[in-house]
Image (cartoon, coloured by chain):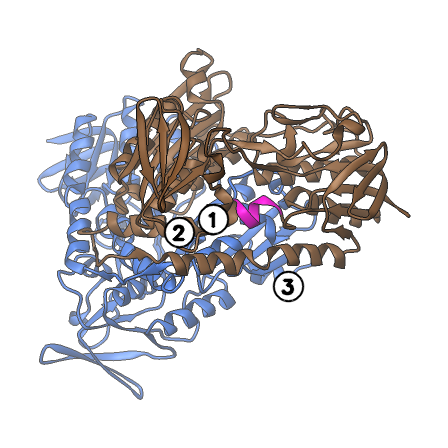
Chain colours: A brown, B blue
């Protein structure tokens, strides 16, 4: 028997669950089909557990920085304790998310979803039909197709490690590789990060990215750039990585070279949904090439970064669109960040664009002697801020510091509120704080 | 011989030095007369050194909170190291401030200023005349007029202690008493805080203030409310505090019961400048009852809180006013904060007003289980947010948490930008952060 819904959502992650709840407030009938953990990547195996584990790096680094500056004694990361705290957070997520959906009147299916035919999704033994379908199946870690690829661990494995090995290697220098490398180093591991060219963190400012790398090198992370690993072999309890003129033994090797959209087993070919290398192709209404099927979150092929709040924003958009609001989706400035010590964060017009364009004024500052950074003896604190000369508004910022999130969130608000630096400097903020320090920029 | 200036500023603190530099950019001739440290209270004996010493409390508390949650090992405050760091910051302030003024073409006088007659200030052996004078002489700690008052130390002494005594007492439960009490406790002292009634931190939300007190009691600060100390006697190396049915021996006693405007020795009676209990009376142009004499910063009698950024804002106003802009001074929402662990911060319409007025919606939240607080195991995190029902904008907030400054600065921007909570929730911020958590409020 076929079950009929107003909307069937494929994927019970941040976007899917959020949209389901919103549609219930419109009294729509909704089903969510999820074959993995309800809650999806972010709370189960992404940003939330990652940042719990990051506290080890933050606190050990802070204590180290303040030695001789008012703090005596050292602390260390207790990985089993930290992992227990992480699991206390993550373990209840899936059932709590599913229960919350069920309690809200959403039918949930813990099954793999597959489009069998136009208007029909198979979920285990059930056939689900709907007026509209929404693909929100997210991404998974990409595994490089090299000899010995079966030895690769992923970020999911890292975020669930019972013990931290003595020596770990990350292949792929995107934000995930950098974040996990910092966490592993703080937990006492010898850490290698391998990248195929000499330009990791490619979506971030090159100069500040290099300064982040310089600092991570100083705290003991071994970077191997312009290095392709072509083979992994197991040698006893270790793994041996090999490439052209490159050899490295390591205890554990993680694939952190990107993520793959979960589109390959959904039967999209049966319903005329086009995909490209980056995911499901959508228009300005998040509508796929099949007009009854929409897509949102990490699985879509758009230029927006694949981030939890973007997924939530897209879910909010589709709720309004399905509720009758016809406007196309529009994005404000979206900040992105590599969490670490220091963190590297960026929003709006990049410094590299501003440097070559007379429309923009680029303000570059070394902030580490500014009050709030000096107070905590932060070794690295840099800012690049982009001003549009036409109206003097702030249009972009890149921040490298242990507290980059604080500033980048404020710059994001400034950009979206079209504030001038001079307007901001008329604000009376709590002094002295990272935010009040911004007045020193100009 | 009398020296003639466009503007003579009495006081070389934050407000005075800032105004002097601004007036030089207008090519005005300027003198600054300061009888104490150039730079004034904030950088020499106020907010800046205080928050340097506060790092001891922040870091020991953070490490304590995370024991068993991923961090092993303990740290302690090394007071001599911390004081050395503080002095490295404060020692150069006065000469650097004076040198900066001099280099900018400002005449500086390290003398006490006294109005001898209309249009004439005496500064040591010099007579200074000017078109306009600006009083920016700040405040000093008030010393209660009780028997043994000569034994009182002040916040200035506290911020320069070579060693932390075993047992210290603060008389006066305003923000200074609370902040110094937290710093002393973290440095290992037994701490008493005495207040004349049972309502310390009177300008802050009573309920959240009480929760701050409860937490400080748990970490070992002894509060003595409804207690008046009437006599201090020295007994050996200790001091003995006595009042009605109250006795307390202590190693050092600090007067933290308010501050007194520095108006009494300026000769204001010679030039018709009126003062009241709170300082120099000014109109909406910061003009005193003598139209050639203005006042700004902590010394003025206005309803604005006496804060460094307020002083800076007033200096900015006078620079524009003297430059020809006739508008009266107008203030946006001004946040105030008691720094500590937790910190208590407030901006805009207070919750107590909102609770009794149908115009307002009061949202109260216990945030300590929210992601960012849970991650660092913060024991206390509360928020009260006031919404104006007429236009759904945020108009007030009170925050109690270790990271209250982060949120209160963002709420200040929201209030001044007239943002609705729903507007804010459309912003895409870095996730997960204290700022992105704000979406959980409603």
Q: Mark 1 or mark 2: which is in front?
A: 1
Q: Position of residue B37 (x, y in %)?
A: 17, 46
Residue B179 falls within the magenta-colored stretch: no
Query: Is residue A436 visible in the rendered structure shown here?
Result: no
Report helix, strand or loop for mark 2: helix
Chain letter of mark 2 equals: A
Q: Mark 2 or mark 3: which is in front?
A: 2
What label sits on residue A55 in the rendered view? 2
Of residues B135 and B420, the one drawn nearer to the viewer in this rendering: B420
The residue that label 1 is drawn on is: A159
Are the numbered discs 2 and 3 placed on the same chain, yes or no?
no
Give the residue displayed 42% in from the left and 21% down from the top.
A351
Closer to the N terminus: mark 1 or mark 2? 2
Residue A42 falls within the magenta-colored stretch: yes
> Residue B103 is drawn in which quadrant?
top left
The residue that label 3 is drawn on is: B356
**Span shown in magenta:** A40-46
Chain letter of mark 1 equals: A
Q: Position of residue A4 (x, y in %)?
A: 88, 45
Q: Is residue A30 left or right of residue B30?
A: right
Are the numbered discs 1 and 2 placed on the same chain, yes or no?
yes
Main secondary structure of the magenta stretch: helix
Residue A105 against residue A231 in the figure, above or below: below
């Amino acid at each position: 028997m076929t079950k009929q819904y107003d909307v069937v959502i494929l994927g019970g992650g941040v976007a899917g669950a959020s949209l389901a709840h919103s549609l219930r407030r419109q009294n729509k009938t909704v089903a969510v089909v999820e074959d993995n953990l309800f809650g999806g990547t972010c709370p189960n195996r992404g940003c939330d557990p990652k940042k719990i584990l990051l506290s080890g790096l933050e606190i050990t680094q802070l204590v180290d920085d303040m030695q001789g500056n008012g703090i005596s004694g050292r602390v260390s990361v207790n990985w089993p304790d930290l992992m227990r705290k992480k699991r206390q957070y993550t373990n209840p997520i899936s059932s709590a998310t599913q229960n919350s959906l069920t309690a809200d009147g959403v039918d949930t299916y813990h099954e793999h979803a597959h489009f069998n035919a136009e208007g029909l999704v198979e979920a285990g033994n059930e056939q689900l039909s709907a007026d509209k379908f929404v693909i929100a199946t997210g991404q998974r870690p990409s595994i490089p197709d090299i000899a010995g690829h079966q030895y690769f661990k992923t970020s999911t494995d890292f975020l669930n490690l019972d013990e931290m090995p003595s020596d770990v290697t990350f292949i792929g220098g995107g934000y995930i590789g950098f974040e996990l490398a910092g966490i592993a180093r703080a937990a006492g591991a010898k850490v290698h990060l391998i990248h195929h060219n000499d330009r990791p963190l490619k979506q971030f400012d090159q100069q500040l990215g290099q300064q982040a790398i310089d600092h991570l090198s100083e705290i003991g992370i071994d970077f191997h750039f312009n290095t392709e690993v072509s083979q992994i072999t197991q040698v006893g309890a270790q793994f041996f990585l090999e490439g052209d003129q490159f050899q490295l033994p390591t205890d554990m090797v993680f694939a952190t070279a990107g993520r793959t959209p979960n589109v390959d087993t959904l039967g999209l070919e049966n319903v005329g949904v086009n995909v490209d290398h980056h995911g499901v192709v959508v228009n300005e209404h998040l509508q796929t090439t099949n007009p009854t099927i929409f897509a949102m979150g990490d699985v879509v092929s758009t230029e927006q970064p694949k981030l939890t709040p973007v997924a939530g924003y897209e879910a909010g958009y589709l709720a309004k669109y399905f509720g009758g609001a016809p406007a196309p989706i529009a994005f404000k400035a979206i900040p992105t960040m590599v969490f670490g010590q220091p963190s590297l964060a960026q929003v709006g017009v990049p410094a590299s664009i501003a440097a070559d364009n007379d429309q923009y004024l680029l303000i570059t500052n070394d902030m580490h002697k500014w009050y709030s950074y000096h107070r905590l003896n932060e070794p690295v604190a840099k800012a690049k801020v982009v001003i549009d000369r036409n109206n003097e508004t702030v249009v972009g910022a890149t921040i490298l510091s242990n507290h980059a999130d604080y500033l980048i969130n404020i710059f994001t608000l400034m950009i979206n509120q079209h504030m001038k630096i001079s307007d901001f400097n008329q604000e009376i903020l709590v002094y002295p704080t990272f935010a009040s320090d911004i007045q020193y920029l100009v």
